[in-house]
Image (cartoon, coloured by chain):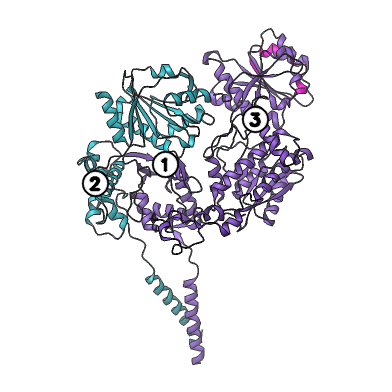
């Protein structure tokens, strides 16, 4: 009896203790963990308080600023690892960096501080932040050792709850390395869809694999130096990782691609996707990357997703969208406001035609250049001479966008016979696919082509560098455009990975790309490629060109690369 | 239920409740309100609250170092640091009041010796403006030479819309100057040149100016690369890599030939002082 009572009491005590010790969900200023992270992220990236109001601060001692002008992300960038711009170094503000003490130059070393020669030890130190001192830094601009932060760091007005949310977010920002990296290797993958012909597949893959081989060949004996090099170079060499490159072949219906991607990822998580190629809409892969927060660097596709606020995929160009937008800009820059021609566009519904027409329409609306008349050619409708003549009767004198392939242009010489000639005509060079001769000579005087690549004779040195690089690696030049693009990707990747060092965070990886210098040399098929925070289409220009009146016409440039 | 059954249920239940109750008593109190200058004062008292909170911070012995660091600098901080802390706290008070009235900033201005001036490089130079046509935030063509031949005082900077650190400060600086000038803002021409014409379109420049509450009289220009670079070179502000650009602000007095070239990030006090000096020279 006594024994039973005692055992009941003991059981009750144990039960009580277990219940108390068990996970009482952590709340931050009253918010659940996930909610707090979302709100903190919104503060960091958009400068909005949980209440929805703009964050306010003072910068440079006396300039009031609010979250619309800029926020934490502006200087500390998305991954939180900071930035360098001109004379201003913005230090990291991610959890791993803030909440440990720092001595400059002691990031990763084989020797502990005590082991280092006294005269080489760093004297620049900062104690670890605590939640309290971090709040103090954000509010009043002092570090934990009482040093004043540069006045370029805003002093924020935040109440305790909002501060708790922000501090919680910073604690978790880039605090754990992203998947796809281990002690020896960064794992990458490249996506190839089954509509791609074998020659194009090889052009992309062999070039990319050559870059990976080059990196893994360790011409600087990186792994050996990590073991045996002088300790003050440890950070550089111990950051080295080999690269692995998996090939993710996607087959069949694009609706099944997300599942295929998920399965590949499940078998071996990767840090990022490199290159890749498809002749179809890249959207399923784009959305997979956006959802899983996986960087996708410079895939080759005529159909990128146009979404200015998405983050994870960097494309070479807006492709058809770029052409149509540039046509609209060219019209704006050519004509005075009060002399704008009326606009008409002709296209066949389909992936290319739809994109060109949609982009042209949107840009024209945004620029207020007037209404656009759409003429959709059905599948069974031929663009014969009667079609072109009829067009002239209804739309004489207008600016005509001809978003059609080469085959549809054979009878378009009729344009030259209009009683009111077109103000101008525009054709997409990409849609012509190099068949410039098909554009009738009689209309070349007033017809422009949107050309989103460099001119044929523009970059001989870059092409030569590409050819030489491929030759040394015994890769035949089979597709100059694809191989030039992938050569550029590998060239950039090398630099980006070096900058990343041991900070294996995917957002940081993209931040690094965003900070890279504009490139003119290493990219043979575009005049210039540029980067910037949040910029996701690397080649941003378009030439307007005309054709000479020869059976094998030459391209003549009629505009700058940038048309505004 | 018999008494033994009751004991079997209620004794463990009671003990468990006791344990929970005890645990909650031992649990930490929620952190006390610590905010000083960020406290939301009643609207009528906001100005006073801004200043009073500095005084309160100095007087009350509060738990956090941060609070002390605001207005009553800890004993081991240098006088310079203390002055800066005071200034930033006072400025926060002024911001809360959301006015630009002199009295709100008076706690900073009373002792100029205490206010830490910001360091910057200042030189004078003549620049030859190139004859190029750029495009403004409304998509209109602008002849740069014609624009610069205005009689108004002119302020110039070089920025780009996705810039991280320097440009937001330079632009906030322009925005605050326009506010400070009040009704006189339209008598001054503010010009920002994009150094990322690849990306900066009129639409994006417009959006950027809206974010900074730009008032009429602030022109943002983009164009083709050659023209933009010629303007950069004309102002001795050329950089090959936009990420390396310097924090430059240029001022030219009405009818003057020379430009004041400021290299360094400044606040509104410095900017206004330079501007007023222009009028005097």
Q: Name the residue under label 2.
A: B51
| Nearer-the-camera pick, A129 or A145 | A145
Region of the chain picked out in magenta, as a range: A392-412
Classify 10 Å Cα crowding around label 2: few (below 14), some (14-19), many (20 and above). many
Name the residue located 28 percent from the left edge and 25 percent from the top edge.
Answer: B278
- Residue A444 occupies quadrant: top right
Shade representing chain A? purple
Q: Residue A165 in magenta?
A: no
Q: Mark 3 points at which residue?
A: A461
Q: Residue A408 in magenta?
A: yes
Q: Name the residue under label 1.
A: A88
Q: Is disc 1 in contact with disc 2, using a CB cutoff of under 8 Å?
A: no
Residue A527 vertical placement versus A165 (above, below): above
- The x and y percentages for residue A213 are 69, 48
Q: Is disc 2 in contact with disc 3, using a CB cutoff of under 8 Å?
A: no
- Distance between the alpha carbons at the discs numbered 1 and 2: 32 Å
- Distance between the alpha carbons at the discs numbered 1 and 3: 35 Å
Circle nearer the viewer, 1 or 3 = 3
- The x and y percentages for residue B133 are 48, 19
Classify 10 Å Cα crowding around label 1: few (below 14), some (14-19), many (20 and above). some
Q: Is residue A481 left or right of residue B180?
A: right
The chain in cyan: B
């Amino acid at each position: 009896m006594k024994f039973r009572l005692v055992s009941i009491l003991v059981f009750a005590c144990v039960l009580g203790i277990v219940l108390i010790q068990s996970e009482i969900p952590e709340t931050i200023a009253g918010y659940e963990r996930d909610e707090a992270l979302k709100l903190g992220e919104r503060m960091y990236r958009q400068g909005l308080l949980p209440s929805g109001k703009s964050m306010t601060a003072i910068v440079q001692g006396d300039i009031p600023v609010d979250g619309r002008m800029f926020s934490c992300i502006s200087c500390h960038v998305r991954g939180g690892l900071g930035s360098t711009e001109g004379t201003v170094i913005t230090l990291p503000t991610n959890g791993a960096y803030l909440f440990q003490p720092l001595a400059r130059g002691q990031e990763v070393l084989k020797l502990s501080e005590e082991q280092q020669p006294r005269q080489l030890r760093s004297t620049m130190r900062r104690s670890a932040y605590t939640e309290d001192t971090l709040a103090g830094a954000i509010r009043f601009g002092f570090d934990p050792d009482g040093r004043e932060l540069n006045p370029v760091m805003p002093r924020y007005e935040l109440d305790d709850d909002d501060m708790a949310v922000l501090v919680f977010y910073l604690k978790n920002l880039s605090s754990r390395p992203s998947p796809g990296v281990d002690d020896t290797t960064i794992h990458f993958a490249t996506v190839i869809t089954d509509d791609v012909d074998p020659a194009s597949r090889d052009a992309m893959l062999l070039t990319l694999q050559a870059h990976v081989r080059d990196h893994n060949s360790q011409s600087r004996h990186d792994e050996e130096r990590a073991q045996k090099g002088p300790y003050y170079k440890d950070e550089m060499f111990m950051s080295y990782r080999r690269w692995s490159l998996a090939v993710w072949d996607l087959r069949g219906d694009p609706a099944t691609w997300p599942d295929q991607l998920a399965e590949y990822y499940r078998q071996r998580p990767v840090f990022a996707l490199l290159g890749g190629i498809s002749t179809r809409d890249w959207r399923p892969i784009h959305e997979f990357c956006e959802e899983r927060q996986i960087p996708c660097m410079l895939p080759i596709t005529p159909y990128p997703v146009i979404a200015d606020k998405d983050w994870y995929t960097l494309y070479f160009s807006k492709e058809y969208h770029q052409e149509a937008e540039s046509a609209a800009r060219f019209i704006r820059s050519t004509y005075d406001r009060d002399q704008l021609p009326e606009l008409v566009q002709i296209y066949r519904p389909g992936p290319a035609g739809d994109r060109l027409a949609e982009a042209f329409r949107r840009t024209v609306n945004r620029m207020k250049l007037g209404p656009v008349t759409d003429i959709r050619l059905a599948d069974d409708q031929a663009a014969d001479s009667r079609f072109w003549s009829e067009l002239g009767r209804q739309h004489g004198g207008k600016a005509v966008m001809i978003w059609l392939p080469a085959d549809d242009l054979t009878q378009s010489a009729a344009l030259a016979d209009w009683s009111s000639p077109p103000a101008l005509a525009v054709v997409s060079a990409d849609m012509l696919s190099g068949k410039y001769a098909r554009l009738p000579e009689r209309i070349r005087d007033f017809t422009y082509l949107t050309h989103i690549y460099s001119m044929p004779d523009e970059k001989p040195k870059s092409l030569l560098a590409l050819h030489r690089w491929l030759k040394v690696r015994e890769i035949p030049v089979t597709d100059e455009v694809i191989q030039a693009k992938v050569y550029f990707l590998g060239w950039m990747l090398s630099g980006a990975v070096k900058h990343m060092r041991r900070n294996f965070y995917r957002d940081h990886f993209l931040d690094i790309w965003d900070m890279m210098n504009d490139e003119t040399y290493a990219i043979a098929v575009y005049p210039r490629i540029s980067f910037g925070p949040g910029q996701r289409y690397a080649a941003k220009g378009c030439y307007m060109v005309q054709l000479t009146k020869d059976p094998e016409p030459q391209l003549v440039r009629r505009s700058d690369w940038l048309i505004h | 239920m018999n008494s033994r059954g009751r004991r079997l249920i209620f004794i463990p239940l009671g003990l468990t409740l006791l344990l929970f109750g005890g645990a909650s008593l031992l649990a930490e109190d929620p952190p006390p309100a610590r905010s000083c200058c960020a406290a939301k004062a009643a609207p009528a008292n906001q100005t006073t609250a801004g200043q009073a909170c500095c005084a309160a911070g100095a007087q009350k012995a509060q738990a956090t170092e941060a609070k002390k660091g605001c207005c009553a600098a800890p004993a081991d901080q240098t006088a310079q640091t203390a002055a800066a802390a005071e200034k930033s706290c006072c400025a926060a008070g002024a911001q809360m009041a959301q006015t630009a009235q002199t009295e709100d900033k008076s706690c900073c201005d009373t002792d100029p010796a205490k206010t830490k001036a910001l360091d910057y490089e200042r030189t004078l130079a003549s620049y030859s403006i190139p004859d190029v046509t750029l495009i403004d935030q409304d998509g209109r063509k602008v002849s740069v030479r014609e624009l610069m031949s205005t009689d108004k005082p002119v302020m110039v900077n070089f920025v780009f819309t996705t810039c991280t650190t320097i440009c937001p400060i330079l632009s906030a600086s322009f925005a605050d100057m326009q506010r400070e000038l009040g009704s006189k803002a339209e008598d001054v021409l503010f010009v920002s040149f994009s150094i990322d014409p690849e990306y900066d379109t009129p639409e994006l420049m417009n959006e950027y100016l809206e974010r900074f509450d730009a008032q009429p009289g602030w022109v943002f220009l983009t164009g083709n690369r050659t023209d933009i670079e010629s303007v950069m070179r004309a102002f001795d502000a050329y950089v090959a890599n936009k990420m390396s650009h310097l924090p430059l602000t240029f001022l030219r007095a009405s009818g003057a030939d020379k430009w004041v070239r400021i290299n360094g990030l400044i606040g509104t006090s410095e900017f206004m002082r330079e501007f007023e000096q222009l009028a005097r020279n």
